[in-house]
Image (tube, rainbow, N blue to C red):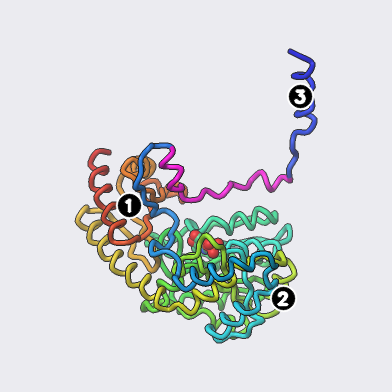
Amino acid sequence: MSPIDTLSRTESEKTAVQVAENITHLVPYSPGKPVAEVERELGITGIIKLASNENSLGPSPKAVEAMHQFALKMHIYPDARSFELSNALASALEVDPACVVLGNGSDDIIHLLGITFLEPGDEVIQAHPSFVRYEAAAILNNAPCHMVPLTSDWIHDLEAMAAKVNANTRLIFITNPNNPTGTIVSQEALDRFFECVPERAVVVIDEAYYEYAANREGYPETLRYVREGRNVVVLRTFSKAYGLAGLRVGYGIMPPDIANWLNHTREPFNVNLMAQEAALAALSDTEHVDKTVEMNEAGKQMLYRTFEEMGLGYTPTFANFIWFDSGKNSRAVFQALLHEGVIIRTGDIFGAPSHLRVTVGTDAENAKFVNALKKVLPLL
Ligand SMILES: Cc1ncc(COP(=O)(O)O)c(C=O)c1O
């Protein structure tokens, strides 16, 4: 061994990275597999991705137009308070602008809630399976996260969640519609839940898929809890129905004192200028959102019919994805679909080994998925 080798080994041992204990429990987020990666790995083209609940219609054309216009302004910093966008959201939602906090995606707000509210000894409650970033916020802040199983119908079990509440409970996450199952909780269930929750706990209602559910019967109105002055944060995003996932704009609506503290903890320029302008334009593009929701409704019905014909169980959805039971190993189904140029999500990461989650796409994408599924399932 040369002196150089010896030196480098000793040096790397000396500098072995020591991270905080809680960080070693973090599982890096596993995003939907990118199209370019599958193209590289399998050498095929024409791949479709129905794995990340994106909007297959693309961004709002008004947002695209705004981005072209504002490209020439990229040498200036964004407005740190996202003044215009916050005000536009506040007036659309009929809340005070002081109730709105913008984030680099709603992920950012989840992160901010963790660092703002959690101290060692505090506890978090979430449903399982549900969105994985809540647990990450808990781990980052040394707070245990209680995972409360969904009911057998894949719905949040709010009674069981309420039973987990104690004096240390600080954050409670309710995902409505839930990801990955597309199910919702009712207004009555939420009202009953709030009767059991102490003031000290902040209840976060994650409505990332709000636009798909808003006009459906049974979907609760939750901003009223904020207006009533409860410690409630409602999360929404421009990533899903508005088709702006790549830009990263999400927001929370909450009582002004909570908003004030999140404004202390967030990065000053957490929403970039292009994102602020595009989101502002997208907000006025109701035509694009309506078209998106319409496409989703038609796609859902077609996929339901297919699952029924194939004898596969599925969960009726309030969002733009469907949770279905392939009856086979979900990893094997996922791999076989990849070879057919279709990327979806396995359920095993959510603890459901034969389930998968597919995003509802355009007619052509849905048809490609259905043909691929019909081809691969009998072979597995
Ligand atoms: C339930 C839920 N919440 C939050 C997010 C994060 O969305 P974004 O950070 O893009 O706003 C997602 C994204 O998939 C989600 O499914």
2, 333: nearer the viewer: 2
Q: Position of residue 232 (x, y in %)?
A: 60, 75
In magenta, the rendered stretch is 20-40
Numbered disc 2: secondary structure: helix
**Of marks 3 and 2, which one's residue comes earlier in the chain?**
3
Residue 145 vs residue 377, the one in the foreground: 377
Residue 267 percent across, percent down from the top left: 71, 64
Q: Nearer the viewer, mark 3 or mark 1?
A: 3
In percent of width and height, residue 227 lies at 59, 85
Please tell me in which quadrant of the rendered image residue 262 appears.
bottom right
Q: CA distance from mark 3 to mark 2?
A: 49 Å
Query: Residue placed at 38% from the left, 59% from the top?
Result: 152
Q: Is residue 17 magenta?
A: no
**What residue occupies the far front of the structure in this picture?**
72
Q: Is residue 159 visible?
A: no
Task: Give the residue pinned by disc 1.
Answer: 325
Q: Which residue is mark 2?
A: 260
Q: Where does the image place residue 163, in percent across and percent down from the top left?
A: 55, 66
Q: Amino acid at mark 1?
A: Asp
